Image: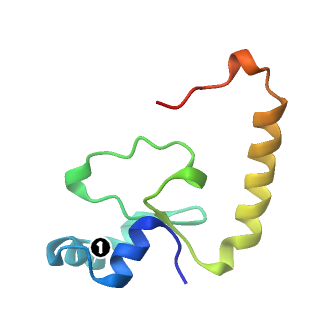
């Protein structure tokens, strides 16, 4: 099982054949600590420093416990930070 909006496009066949071919040939090169990145070359370098919220990050149930733990730590740290120092998404 994989999870992310990009994974849904992959499952339903919405990705162009050229993108699927690139992912097939480069899948093992896209490995991250707890999953994989589905960012395609034409999208440029990854600018996401927190893959917990990245739509291009895919993973399996194998990593669910570690991801839940990391998400809890991230959420606690975010809520503990003073409001004036929180980063605002654009």
Image location of residue 45, percent across then percent down: 32, 45
Indicate the quadrant where residue 47 lies.
top left
Q: Is residue 47 left or right of residue 76?
A: left
Residue 89 vertical position relative to residue 15 in the rendered view, above or below: above
Residue displayed at 26% across by 76% down: 14
Q: Is residue 6 left or right of residue 44?
A: right
Residue displayed at 61% across by 26% down: 87
Residue 70 vertical position relative to residue 12 in the rendered view, above or below: above
Indicate the quadrant where residue 1 lies.
bottom right
Task: Estimate how packed mark 1 is, as few (under 14), some (14 to 19) or many (20 or more) residues with alpha carbons within 10 Å.
Answer: some
Q: Is residue 77 left or right of residue 84?
A: right
Report helix, strand or loop for mark 1: helix
Indicate the quadrant where residue 76 lies.
top right
Image location of residue 52, percent across then percent down: 60, 54
* Residue at mark 1: 23
Image location of residue 11, percent across then percent down: 38, 83
Image location of residue 35, percent across then percent down: 54, 68
Residue displayed at 67% across by 79% down: 62
Colouring mode (rainbow / by chain / secondary structure / one colour): rainbow
Number of labels in the image equals 1
Residue at the extreme left: 18
């Amino acid at each position: 099982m994989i999870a992310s909006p990009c994974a849904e496009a992959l499952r339903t066949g919405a990705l162009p054949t050229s993108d699927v071919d690139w992912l097939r040939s480069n899948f093992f090169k896209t490995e991250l600590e707890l999953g994989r990145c589905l960012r395609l070359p034409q999208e440029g370098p990854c600018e996401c420093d927190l893959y917990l919220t990245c739509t291009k990050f895919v993973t399996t149930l194998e990593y669910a416990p570690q991801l839940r733990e990391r998400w809890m730590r991230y959420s606690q740290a975010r809520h503990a930070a003073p409001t004036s120092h929180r980063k605002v998404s654009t």
